[in-house]
Image: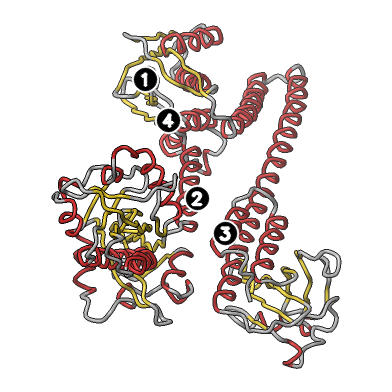
Amino acid sequence: MADTSVPATETRQRLYSIIRKEIPFDKKAREVLEVGAEYLGLEYGYITRIDSEMGDWVVAITTDTEEFPVGLRCPLQNTHCRETITTETHYALYDAPSLGRADDPKPQARKQGTYLGIPLISNESLYGTVCFAAEEPRSDPFSDVETWFAEHLAGLLERELVRDHVEAKLTNQTNLATVLNRVLRHNLRNDISVIRGYTELLNEQVENVSTIQTILDHIDDLIEMSQKARELQRTVTAGSERRQAELGEFIQRIVHDIEQDYPEASISVEHDEKLHVDVLQNFDRAVEELVKNAVKHSGDTPTVTVAIDGAPNAAEIRIDDDGPGLPENEGQVLTTGERTPLAHGSGLGISLARWIVTSHDGSLTAEVTEGGTTITITIPRQSGLGIQQQLTELSRSRDKYKSAFDEAVDAMVIADDDGRYIKVNDSATDLFGVPEGKLLGRTIADFIPEGVGFEEEWQQFRTADEQQGTVRIMRPDGSERIVEYAAKSNIVPGEHLSVLRDVTEREERKQELTALKQRYKTLLEAAPDPVFIADIETGEIINANAAAETTLDRSRQEIVGHHQSDLHPSDKSELYHELFQEHVQSEGMRRYLPDGAPIYMITGDGEQVQVEISVGRVSLPDGPVAFGIFRELTSRIDYTSETVQQLTTE
C-alpha cells in the first residue's frame, strides 16, 4: 500500500516543484523517482532504456546506484519490463513469488518481489519504462490510486524527456550554426583580403585599369557584406537594455558622421519639437544604415531629408531621397524580411535595419514615387516588450497558469461546448473519485441524480457568462458529495472553466449545528428553573428562558445585556465575577463562592434565595456560550446536571 504518512497533496506539490527546477533531466528524473518510491512505499525506482528490436534492456537512471546501478544491462526477455511494454498503462506484480516469478528477472542484481512498471514514450516511440520495485512482496495488490499516481508520474517524465531532447537538439543546431557562421566569415574575410592584394598587384601590370577597378569594387562589396553579416548576427543576439534618447539630437549626430564620409551629399534634419524615446543600444545603426542607403541610391549629388514627427504614443522618422527609387529586392527585404534567391547577396544593410526596428516593436515602410523614395520608421515612445520578450512573458504566464491549475487545492475542470471535460487537475480526480483517464470526456451529468436538466442548465450557463451554485454529486463508489462551484464560460473560445469545492463536511456540520441549536431552544424553554445564556469572554447575558423572567420578575429585554453578577447580591460582586470565570473553565456544579459562602440569587421582590448553579459550554453556530441553570436548594429536583450534561455533550 502507499505510504499513508505522505499525503497525496504534499506529494503532488513536491513533484511539480521538482519538474519546475532548471536542472539536467537525469537529476530531475532521479528526484521524481525518489518521491514516487517513497509514496508507493517501495525500495527504489528506475528508468530503463529499451531496444525492443534488439531485445536489449539497460538501466538509464536509478535511485539505487550501488545494487542497481546505471548501465546495468541484460536481455529484455529476462525482465518484468518485457510485459510492461506490451501494455498502454501499467504492469503490476505485488507478490511475484506466488506467481512463480521469484527468480525473474534472472540477470538483474536484485530479486523483485514487488514490481510496478509503466511504458515511457518519447516522440510517439518507445523509450523504455518507469519502474518501482522492492525485494519483498506486498500483502495487498496495488490500488487504483497508486497505479494512477505511477502513470501520472511517468507522464510528467515523458514531457520532460521530450523537452530535454528538443532543447538538446536546439542547442546542437545553434552551436553548429554559430561555428559555421564564425568559420565561414573568418575564411571569407581572409581569402577576400588575399584576393584583393593580388588584384592590386595586377592593376600595375595590365592595361585595362577599369576592369581591375570593377573587380576591386566587387571585392570591397564582399568585404562590406561580411562585416554587415557579422553586425546582423550581433543585432539578433543583442540584449534588451534600453536608454532614453531625444530623437533630434540623436539623429543629428548620426547625420554629421555620415556627412564626413559622403561630402557630396546634402543631408538635413527637420523636427519641430523634442521627442524622447526609449531605444536599444543599436538603434543608431538602423538609422545610419537607412540614411546611407538613401545617399548611395540617389546619384552623384544626393539630397536626403530626415524628418521627425510625433504620433499617438509613437515617433516617426521619415527618410526622403531624390533618387530613382529603392531596388525591388531591397524593398522586399524591407517590407517582408524575405530574400529572393537572385538577390541573396544584397540588402544585408536593409535586413540589419529591419531587425533592429522590429526588435523595438516598430515597423518599416517604403513608398517610391517619381520624386524619390520615402522610408518611414515608426517606433513606440516608451519601451514595450519585444517579440522575444513577449514570447518569454507568454511562456511564463502559461507556466503560472498551468502550475495554478495543476496544483490548485480546489478541483478545476475545463469543458468543451458540449460540457465534456477536456482538462482536469488532480483535485478534480480526487473529488469525483475517478482517475484522469476515466474523467476526461465525461460531463457533470454523469455524476448528478437523474431528473436534473443538464442540457438546459448548460445552455443557460454558456449564455450567462458566469454562474455559481451548489450541486450534489454521486461518485462511482456510491458516496455522495456536496459541491460548491463557480464557473466561467469561454475563458478561451469554446472552453469553459469550473472551480469546484467539496463542502460536504461544512454542510453536514452546519446541519448538525442547526439541529443542536433547535434542541438548545427546546430545552431552554422547557426547563422549569431559570436558565441564562452568557458570553464566555465577557459574562454578559445574551438570553434567558421564561422561568428566569418569572423568578426575576423582569422581561428578557430587561435581563439581556446585564452581567451575570447582577443576578446576585452586589456586596460580593467581585467574588461572583471570579466564580463565573472559574466556573466557565471547569464547568460542573457550584453551591459556594470562592470564600466558602453560599451562592444567592436576588429575586424580583428583592429576596435572596440560596441556589446551586450548573454551568457548561455549548457550541452553537454563532460560537460557544456559557449555559447556566439556577436551582433553588429548597426545591431539590435532580434533573439539572443531567440537562446540562445532555446539552454540552450533544
Q: Which numbered disc flags the more N-terminal residue, 3 or 1? A: 3
Q: Secondary structure at mark 4?
A: loop
The numbered mark, 3 or 2, whose residue comes first in the sequence reads 3
Q: Earlier in the sequence, mark 1 or mark 2?
A: 1
Q: Position of residue 270 (x, y in %)?
A: 36, 9
* Residue 324 percent across, percent down from the top left: 39, 23
Image position of 4 (left or right of 452):
right
Q: What's the residue type where badge 2 is placed?
A: Asp
- Report the residue at 72% width, 58% height from top: 26
Give amino acid for label 3: Glu
Give the residue number, with chain letter if any, for mark 4. Answer: 384
Name the amino acid, label 4. Answer: Gly
Badge nearest the viewer, 2 or 4: 2
Is there a contact, CB below 8 Å, between mark 3 and mark 2? Answer: no
> Which residue lies under the disc numbered 1?
318
Quadrant housing the C terminus: bottom left
